[in-house]
Image (cartoon, rainbow, N blue to C red):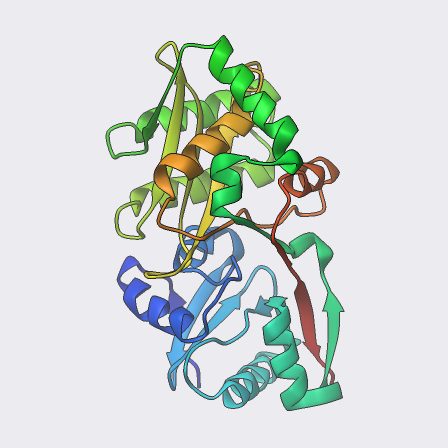
Amino acid sequence: MIIFHEVKLTDKPRIDEMLRASAQRNCELSFSNLYIWQRTYGTTIAFVDDMLLAKNVKRGSFFTPVGPGDLKKAVERLVDFAKQEGCEARFTCVDERGMEQIRALFGDAFTYEHSRDSDDYIYSQQDLATLAGRAFHAKRNHVNRFKATYRWSYEPVTRENIPECLEVSHEWCMRNGVCEDHDVQNEKCAVKAYFEGFEQMGGRGGLLRVEGKPVAFTAGAPQYEGSDTFIVHFEKALADYNGVYATINQLFVENTLGDFAFVNREEDMGLEGLRKAKLSYNPVLLLPKYTVTHVG
């Protein structure tokens, strides 16, 4: 029997060990994502035979087992667990490598469906920091215009200025009339959990001001300790400052993420505007995600 438990800050070293063993780039499979979104998705985890197992109650699914242990046995355990619970054995947000591994082990015992809305956008840190070259001409112009127009300042997120990040988030909600939106409420819960565990999860963020007023913030965490990839979880800005989103993105990556090679800005959730924006930054990798479902 598998005993699942909620994700605790003290689980981070062991989760990182599992992720490091499988060289993860999948944004869902990071300690920070598992921890901050667990209330929204009912995420619980278990460590079994050197594998991390993760269950999402509200999604009715599992994540791909990861770690140095036996993947075949881990998948079989979860299929048996699902049968005992009387539910479907379904794995969501499975990256292409995970999907191919399961298909090699189990063949047509599972179905494999690409979930384009869940694909991760992964960028070169150098590209986002410098915006060099013709491909980034428009982005570079937006940033340069912002810097020339406003009296701005940038600073890393610290325990002291977290309240001002939350001010930006609240004002963004008010201006967009979405404070009561269900998804926004879930995100606010995740933001709260993120800042509560900011230091423990290795969080990093950036805060942008205009004439001293906080107008944008961005924040995230490494894929795991020692990873070359940083995951951006949140980005909020007051859009009446032209170029503010492009500027907080560039300043954060340039000033705060110099020790990473890649930046994962997560998925677009099928939102047309968000997809267009993420593609416009020329990702070096669009990491495919799949839904893998046991047949029978």
Using the rendered image of the protein, determine whether residue 153 is visible from the camera's viewpoint: yes
Q: Quadrant of residue 62?
A: bottom right
Quadrant assignment for the C terminus: bottom right
Residue 138 in the image: x percent, y percent? 65, 27
Q: Is residue 42 above or below residue 191?
A: below
The number of discs equals: 0
Q: Nearer the viewer, residue 221 or 247?
A: 247
Dividing the image into 4 quarters, which one contains the N terminus? bottom left
At horizontal 38% and vertical 61% (from top left) the residue drawn is: 227
Residue 28, image x, y percentages: 52, 59
* Residue in the image at 53% along x and 42% along y: 127
Q: Is residue 1 left or right of residue 107?
A: left
The percent position of residue 289, horizontal first and vertical second, equals 65, 63
Image quadrant assignment for residue 293: bottom right
Q: Which residue lies most toward the left here?
A: 160
Q: Is residue 104 left or right of residue 69?
A: right
Q: Residue at x 30, y 45 (%)?
A: 198
Task: Identify whether 224 is placed above or below 294.
Answer: above
Q: Does 264 appear above or below 3? A: above
Taking the image as drawn, is residue 4 in sight?
no
Tell me the residue at 47%/29% (across/down): 248
Residue 259 x, y percent position in the rendering: 35, 49
Closest to the observer: 218 or 247? Answer: 247
Q: Which residue, as the protein is rendered here, is positioned at the far front?
A: 133
Q: Is residue 260 left or right of residue 181?
A: left
